[in-house]
Image (tube, rainbow, N blue to C red):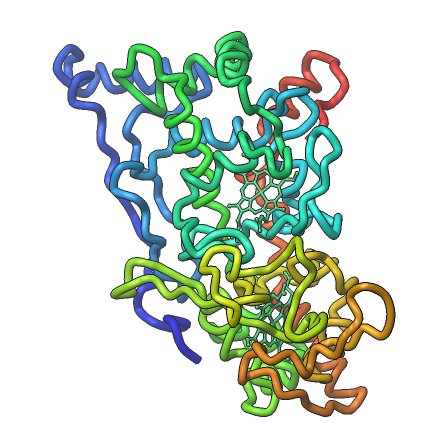
Amino acid sequence: MSDGVGAPGGRAYRARRRVGSAVGRWLPAAGGIAVLALAFAALGAAAPHEEWQWDLPPGFPRPRVPAENPMTVAKVALGRHLFYDTRLSGNGTQSCATCHQQARAFADPQPRGVGSTGEVHPRGPMSLANVAYASALTWANPNMRTLEAQALVPMFGEEPVELGLAGKEQELFRRIRAERRYGPLFAAAFPGEADPVTLVNITRAIASFERTLISGRAPYDRAEHGDHAAMSAAAQRGEQLFFSEQLECFHCHGGYNFTGTTDDVTKGFPEVEFHNTGLYNIGRGHFPADNPGLMAFTGRAEDEGRMKAPTLRNIALTAPYMHDGSIPTLEGVIDHYAAAGRTIADGPHRGVGADNPNKSEFINGFELTAAQRADLIAFLHALTDSSFITDARHANPWLDTLAARGRPRRPE
Ligand code: HEC
Ligand code: HEC
């Protein structure tokens, strides 16, 4: 195995608590801080500048965080509210959590994303588990490198419309200022700013929350770190297959996050990889026109159909599969790899994926007995982290207030 499983980088990171220096100047030290803490507790917001304490799973290194957006408890709290807030869509019907649902490891059950006005995205929503470690974001964009920049796409993008906020920036700010819970949240997240309700701050807070969505406590991890009984014998046999040269899965889905497209503080440079798995072969080497993959950014014919290998963590929760949701089950995904590429017999997409001239050299096909196939599936299921999908720190923070006011639940 590679990329830091079992490496020393995983030590739990304990940060000091800092109190804003401006505050320190006008409050008598100890008593003032206590008063301040009480005040913020009453407002339900964290004290300004309190550094985020990473609670990393064993073997996980610290994510790299942009210098201009350091992690703080207050930013994460604000970002969580924004992530779940339907005020972030033009017509008030959707939030990020509509397409990135906690119960689905922050993916959704639709094959392709469906936006707030009904427009259908050419690709499927991706799991946000461990997105803090993604060195490139979305299925095939080598230039999308930060969560701060990415958040603008669902908010303001028009091809397709997702949240549908284009031209509605001022309306968004008005709605946010009108919600009384946001005042203290923004003030704590961006202390000292006269008007902290800005687009930059909104994306910084959302990105900070996304970086906390770390998943690494599946049965596989417990087995890896000493509790061998955590994984069934079948899953252990499946693990051997997954890491075998016969199946080659680990070449593209390697390391602690089961993807080659990874970055963290232990790496000298971010690793970014895109592969063509032979999912299509229309005519000679083509993919459906709405999903050219990496070629859309590089213009190179040989990059057609190359996509990011997504993390396989929580993969049992994120069906359907592949960039366009075109494989409904994990069994179907294994059929695709076993055949060295998918064959589509009829219709406009017909073609023999195994013959795609741009296909990766690691997709060579293999034969498995029914029992081995079941073992491989058992291994993939052992990557489901139930503590992640039930973690109250990642859940919708608005539900308590809505229930208290007796209002129907805000749609996610
Ligand atoms: C209408 C559904 C939808 C909504 C709403 C939505 N997303 Fe997504 N999300 C997607 C789709 C589809 C993709 C894949 C995009 C692509 O490949 O171009 C994606 C990809 C992502 C990724 C990349 C993950 C990775 O592993 O590379 C991030 C991060 C993300 N979304 C964050 C957000 C945030 C933050 C919001 C709210 C501001 C949001 N999304 C709202 C559908 C949605
Ligand atoms: C050549 C690199 C490569 C190899 C080898 C590989 N994969 Fe993948 N995997 C990918 C890429 C790229 C995708 C996304 C493809 C797409 O959407 O067109 C993917 C997608 C998947 C998905 C669906 C993920 C999702 O979120 O939809 C699963 C499951 C999967 N692979 C499992 C495996 C298994 C099991 C093996 C070994 C039998 C394997 N992969 C071998 C690169 C690879």
Quadrant for the C terminus, please: top right
Judging depth in this view, the residue of 264 and 118 nearest the camera is 118
Q: Is residue 234 visible?
A: no
In the figure, 177 relative to 206: above or below?
A: above
Query: At x 15% / y 10%, what residue is drawn?
Result: 26
Judging depth in this view, the residue of 376 and 320 nearest the camera is 320
Number of numbered markers: 0
Q: Hey, which quadrant is residue 135 in on the image?
A: bottom left
Relative to 237, is 208 on the left or the right?
left
Query: At x 17% / y 12%, what residue is drawn?
Result: 27
x, y percentage for residue 197?
41, 17
Query: At x 68% / y 15%, what residue is drawn?
Result: 404
Relative to 381, is 40 on the left or the right?
left
Q: In the displayed image of the protein, which residue is found farthest to the right?
A: 346
x, y percentage for residue 242?
59, 81
Query: At x 68% / y 71%, what residue is drawn?
Result: 279
Q: Is residue 308 visible?
A: yes
- If the picture is divided into quarters, which one holds ligand 1? top right
Quadrant for the N terminus, please: bottom left
In the figure, 21 relative to 195: above or below?
A: below
x, y percentage for residue 204?
39, 33
Judging depth in this view, the residue of 285 and 163 nearest the camera is 285
x, y percentage for residue 107?
64, 49
Judging depth in this view, the residue of 348 and 12 nearest the camera is 348
In the figure, 281 relative to 88: above or below?
A: below
